[in-house]
Amino acid sequence: MSVTRKLLLGLAFVIALIAPAALPGAFATANADPIGFPPDWPFYEMQTEQTMCNAMAQGWSRAQIVGAMQQANNQSVTGLNPDQAAKRANMWVDLGRIKYCPGAVAN
């Protein structure tokens, strides 16, 4: 093996050892609390607000929040079909960013 090849191999080994210590946030695992909306979430403003703000704080996207709310919706309880639930959830996300959890972002 040539000297250059040995140096490159040694450099790669050193980088592999040092990189995790130098960039701990880059290798951190997700440690988020589970988020779940109740099946009758449209009737419970405060609980839905807190759940939605927690999701935004954990970095959930708008699509993830709306999808979770739409999936949790129990049509026989709320009277909302899946499309109506998605529209209502979208409105809640907009309202949440302004009223409930200002400064939170749900892209």
Image (cartoon, rainbow, N blue to C red):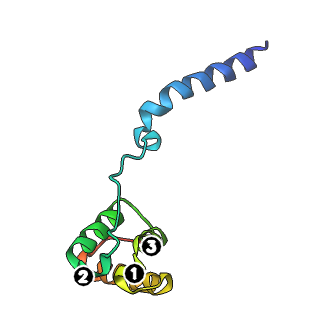
Q: Which mark is residue 76?
A: 1
Compare marks 2 and 3 and give the one earlier in the sequence: 3
The residue depicted at 67 percent of the width and 21 percent of the height is 9
Question: Observer-nearest residue: 24 or 85?
Answer: 85
Instruction: Say what secondary structure mark 3 lies in.
Output: helix
CA–CA distance in space, label 1 to label 2: 29 Å
Relative to 37, is 5 above or below? above
Instruction: Say what secondary structure mark 1 lies in.
Output: helix
Compare marks 3 and 1 and give the one earlier in the sequence: 3
CA neighbours of label 3 inside 10 A, class few (<14), some (14 to 19), many (20+): some
Residue type at numbered disc 3: Arg
Closer mark to the observer between disc 1 and disc 2: 1
| Residue 99 horizontal/vertical position (percent) | 24, 82
The residue where tag 3 is placed is: 62
Compare marks 1 and 2 and give the one earlier in the sequence: 1
Residue type at numbered disc 1: Ser
| Residue 94 horizontal/vertical position (percent) | 36, 83
The residue depicted at 74 percent of the width and 20 percent of the height is 5
The residue depicted at 24 percent of the width and 69 percent of the height is 50
Q: Which mark is residue 99?
A: 2
Residue type at numbered disc 2: Lys
CA–CA distance in space, label 2 to label 3: 16 Å
